[in-house]
Image (tube, rainbow, N blue to C red):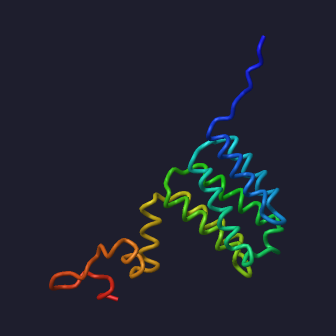
Amino acid sequence: MEDTPIKSTKGEVVADNAATALNLIPMVGGALSDIARGVVERRQNRRLNGFLLSIAEDFKILEERLNQEFLGTEDALDLFEDVVTKASETRQQGKLDALRQTFISCILADRPKYDEATEILSLIHGWQERHVVLVRILSDPIRADAELGGVVGSGGGMTTSLRAIL
């Protein structure tokens, strides 16, 4: 009888690569990788793998600015587990981006506010993608209009342009 090796699916290979990339992060990579592998094992999906890879890339780019003291705490690990769990439960790219940006902002802060970050993550998790877009527009309308290609425009007679109004 011939042994047929079990082959990994494409998704399992990507998940393993994402967890391995997180493992390379100094000091906390092992713990982050373990959390990621646990969540990925429960829900194999492309979006989560891409999410984990984007966090690993952010860590590489921002390595010198990361709050290493905070990263060594239980709060940081709990926050990462929370963000990965919430990311595994969403299909909307805008929400995934907002979750990632909230986590990265927290670990870049001189004095990270764990409770505030978890509250924001919970809000994002409960929103639809259109809510995330609305918050971006309201937080910086001129930049949002520019990023959307100037959809507001300069108007015809009475101005409707955010640039002109503000």
Hey, which quadrant is residue 23 in on the image?
bottom right
Residue under the image location 79 percent in, 51 percent down? 34
Residue under the image location 71 percent in, 46 percent down? 16
Residue 42 in the image: x percent, y percent? 68, 41
Establish if 46 lies above or below 136: above
Which residue ends up furthest to the left in the rendered image?
Answer: 157
**From the image, which quarter does the N terminus lie in?**
top right
Residue 33 in the image: x percent, y percent? 76, 54
Which residue ends up furthest to the top in the rendered image?
Answer: 1
Establish if 142 lies above or below 98: below
Hey, which quadrant is residue 103 in on the image?
bottom right
Residue closest to the eye, 135 or 164: 164
Hey, which quadrant is residue 146 in on the image?
bottom left
**From the image, which quarter does the C terminus lie in?**
bottom left
Residue closest to the eye, 86 or 71: 71
Residue 107 in the image: x percent, y percent? 71, 72
Which residue ends up furthest to the front in the rendered image?
Answer: 2
Query: What is the count of numbered marks?
Result: 0
Residue under the image location 71 percent in, 60 percent down? 80
Residue under the image location 43 percent in, 77 percent down? 138
Is residue 65 shown left or right of residue 101?
Answer: right
Residue closest to the eye, 150 or 7: 7
Is residue 135 shown left or right of residue 6?
Answer: left
Is residue 165 shown left or right of residue 88?
Answer: left
Residue 88 in the image: x percent, y percent? 61, 49
